[in-house]
Amino acid sequence: MRDIAYLALGSNMGDRAGYLAAARDALAQLPHSRVLAVSSAEETAPLGGATTEPFLNQMIALETELSPRALLDAIHVIEQQAGRERRVRWAARTLDIDIVRFARQQVHEPGLQVPHPELPNREFWQRELAELGQSS
């Protein structure tokens, strides 16, 4: 099924803008997928009480035929290629990509909840979705 996934990109290590650009490029190269729109990038404080550098965040709308699980698997590969290490929650990261929502699908599986359960708590995601013409 063709759907539109709204993906949150974030980075707070090294060349933050470069990591976001690389993520956009990699997502655009996924099979049966294309980037429809990109929000402005904005800097935000780290979440969860972490004492790391500020994040640069951005939302993209990705039209895709990939299933939510296949998209999540592809996202994890893109994060790993950017040097992402998943050792400590709330740690600094080169690249973080979250599936925030789909236009027409909801998912409730172990390890994958769409819409993202933190959407109501992240005002910057709501602003970015609004910029893309979507309400949360």
Image (cartoon, rainbow, N blue to C red):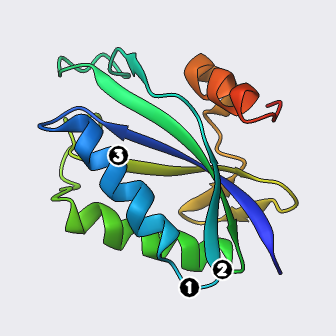
131 relative position to 27: left or right: right
* Residue 12 drawn above or below residue 121: below
Vertical relation: 98 (above or below) 108: above
Q: Nearer the viewer, mark 1 or mark 2?
A: 1
Gap in angstroms between the C-alphas marked 3 and 2: 21 Å
Q: Specify which label sits upstream in the sequence, 3 or 1.
A: 3
Looking at the image, the residue that sits furthest to the left is: 14
* Mark linked to residue 31: 1
- Return the residue nearer the eye: 108 or 72: 72
N-term mark: 1 or 2: 1
Residue 26 in picture, x, y percent from top left: 39, 68
Cβ atoms under marks 1 and 2 closer than 8 Å:
yes
Residue under the point 62% across and 21% down: 121
Say which amino acid is labelled 1: Pro
Q: Residue at x 70, y 27 (%)?
A: 131
Direction bottom: furthest residue: 31
Q: Position of residue 133 (x, y in %)?
A: 81, 33
Category of crowding for the residue at label 2, using alpha-carbon neighbours closer than 10 angstroms: few (below 14), some (14–19), many (at least 20): some
Q: Label 2 belongs to which residue?
A: 66
Any mark on residue 20, and which? 3
Q: Amino acid at mark 3?
A: Leu
State whether residue 123 is above or below residue 107.
above
Badge 2 element: loop
| Type of the residue with mark 2 | Leu
Q: Which sits earlier in the primary sequence, circle 3 or circle 2?
A: 3
